[in-house]
Image (tube, rainbow, N blue to C red):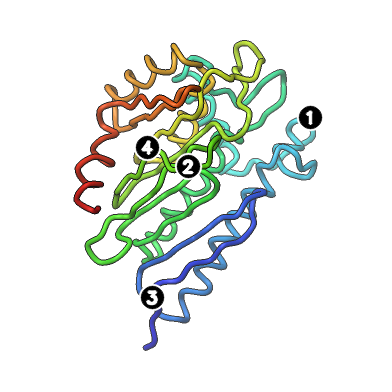
């Protein structure tokens, strides 16, 4: 039986290049449909949750039209409400009567896709969409994935993390509104959150960025103390502030790999 040592594909989805890189050796007859299904899922997410498409469920919701009670839609809106409460409203999917789960949906979609690939037997993979990245398994036998965290404002690599199983989300490349003031937050350069669930990390990164320079550090420290999510904040003047657990993925491992 012929197998691939792995396969990668890049397609435009959600207005950006999305990469699915599978390193698990699978039969030829399984690899192509697996990648086809991966991008079909991402396009379904875009068609369902895009706030700018009038025929999406979010678009219909915002115009007061009847929406389908899709389990995934209920799940996403519920999770957004929970994260809003956990971040004191600095992550908010509903502002001025308009629903927009964009700060959560991309990470959520990639996380769900990653779990589906594991269930399909493709446990070694990396999925990337903009500054959201999900890795599982190994890049090569016995080797962790090496992921460069890019400063979205300066387009330079600020940190390299090494992991077998991690979600990595960076905010700051696009304008982020502080829900409490309605103004675009401009006090930070970027925020990267790493942890076991990419959707959660994505939403936390958005919220921490929206908090601005002072509150962001306090919340990041509390978040790290309470659980598995670690944060790296880049200030407007280029300084780097990280929670202690961030070094576990970028310190000695980076030196050993180098």
Residue at the spot 38% in from the left edge and 27% down from the top edge:
240
Q: Can residue 107 be seen in this view?
A: no
**Residue 24 vs residue 19, the one in the foreground:** 19
Q: Nearer the viewer, mark 1 or mark 4?
A: 4
In the rendering, at what x and y percent does residue 55 appear? 78, 45
**Does residue 143 appear to the left or right of 156 in the view shown?**
left
Q: Tell which circle, 1 or 4, labels the residue nearer the N-terminal end.
A: 1
Residue placed under numbered mark 3 in the picture: 26
- Badge 1 is on which residue? 64
Q: Nearer the viewer, mark 4 or mark 2?
A: 2
State the mark number for residue 194. Answer: 4
Q: Which of marks 1 and 2 is nearer the N terminus?
A: 1
Question: Disc 1 versus disc 4: distance between alpha carbons?
Answer: 36 Å
**Where's the N terminus, which quadrant?**
bottom left
Cα separation between marks 3 and 4? 29 Å
Dots 1, 2 in contact, CB < 8 A: no
Residue visible at 40% across and 33% down in the picture? 193
Horizontal side, residue 18 vs residue 55: left or right: left
């Amino acid at each position: 039986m012929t197998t691939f040592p792995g396969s990668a594909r890049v397609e435009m989805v959600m207005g950006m290049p999305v990469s699915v890189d599978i390193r698990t050796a699978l039969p030829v007859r399984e690899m192509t449909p697996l990648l086809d299904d991966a991008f079909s899922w991402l396009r379904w997410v875009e068609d369902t949750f895009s706030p700018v498409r009038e025929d999406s469920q979010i678009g219909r919701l915002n115009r007061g039209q009847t929406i389908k009670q899709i389990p995934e839609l209920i799940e996403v809106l519920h999770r957004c409400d929970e994260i809003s409460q956990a971040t004191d409203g600095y992550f908010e999917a509903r502002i001025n009567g308009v629903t927009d789960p964009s700060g959560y949906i991309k990470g959520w979609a990639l996380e769900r896709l990653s779990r589906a690939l594991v269930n399909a037997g493709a446990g070694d993979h990396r999925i990337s969409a903009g500054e959201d990245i999900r890795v599982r398994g190994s890049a090569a036998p016995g080797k962790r994935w090496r992921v460069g965290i890019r400063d979205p404002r300066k387009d330079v690599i600020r940190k390299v993390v090494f992991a077998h199983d991690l979600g990595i989300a960076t905010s700051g490349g696009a304008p982020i509104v502080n829900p409490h003031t309605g103004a675009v937050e401009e006090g930070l350069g970027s925020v990267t959150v790493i942890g076991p669930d990419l959707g959660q990390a994505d939403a936390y990164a958005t919220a921490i960025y929206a908090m601005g320079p002072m509150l962001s550090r306090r919340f990041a420290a509390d978040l790290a103390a309470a659980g598995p999510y670690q944060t790296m904040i880049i200030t407007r003047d280029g300084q780097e502030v990280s929670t202690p657990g961030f070094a576990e993925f970028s310190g000695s491992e980076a030196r050993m790999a180098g």
